[in-house]
Image (spheres, helix red, strand yellow):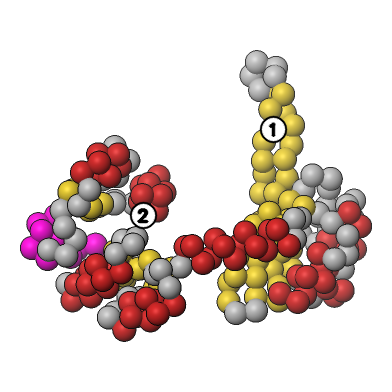
Amino acid sequence: GSSVAITLSKNGADVIVVDKDRDAIQQISDYVSQAVQLDAMDEKALRSVGIEKVDVAIVSIGAHMEASILVTMLLKEMGIPKVVSKALSESHGKVLTRVGADQIVFPERDMGAKLAKSLVSPTILDHIEVSPGYNIVELAVPEPLKGKSIIKSQVRTKYGVEIVAIKRSTPQLDSRGESVITEDIIIAPPPETKLEEGDIIIVIGKEDALQKFRKME
């Protein structure tokens, strides 16, 4: 929860954090618009800080399943347009959906799956499932493609995947004459773009096509 709140704040969102734990509130108060110690199951207390006016509410209550369900239900009854709730299990997620949660997240399950994929395929730097059977992966340019343009690599025709972005690190000199590495991101790279040593490519496609693509090494 604190990670989400801080990231939202850094990206310009007005964030209100509520928690019963005084220490948790003190630790995050410098990073968000408002941090208040209160019981999230107390509707009157929530309204006192304007929770009913928010665009999105995130319920990140950890081990207390009953509390997360009750708070999710309360927030929807207060008329909040979108409630995102953390679930500890599939059954927990089903209950949260039934009481009105608009989106369910399974952080432990999802991170476990991501870790397993990275161990099975060490070349994968990151992995996101965008829909069942379709994934986005971030990986180093396979050896056979280095020095080739995207169009000559034939990744779409041979493997059925699409390179949607390239991360490229370039050494430069700073104002003091010292060497620094800058990272550029090429979004929707043109077909003639060459894949260079050290490039990181972001590729989208079906899982079986991505597996075939990775095995070219």
Q: Nearer the viewer, residue 94 or 177?
A: 94
Task: Give the residue type at disc 2.
Answer: Gly
Q: Magenta part mainly helix, strand or loop?
A: helix
Q: Quadrant of residue 54?
A: bottom left
Callout 2–callout 1 Cβ contact below 8 Å = no
Q: Residue furthest top?
A: 176
Q: Can you identify the residue that label 1 sits on?
A: 181
Alpha carbons under labels 2 and 1: distance apart: 32 Å
The magenta region covers 43-56
Q: Residues within 10 Å of mark 1 (few under 14, many from 20)?
A: few
Q: Is label 1 in a helix, a strand or a loop?
A: strand
Q: Residue 195: x, y in percent?
A: 83, 52
Judge by depth and name the residue closer to the eye, 59 or 173. Answer: 59
Q: Read off the residue under disc 2.
A: 1
Above or below, 6 against 42 in this view is: above
Instruction: List x then y, in percent, for residue 145.
Output: 88, 57
Q: Hey, which quadrant is residue 163 in on the image?
A: bottom right
Which sits in the foreground, 133 or 167? 133
**Rendered location of residue 197, percent (x, y):** 84, 45
The residue positioned 66% from the left and 23% from the top of the image is 174
Compare marks 2 and 1 and give the one earlier in the sequence: 2
| Residue at position x 90%, y 51% in the image | 147
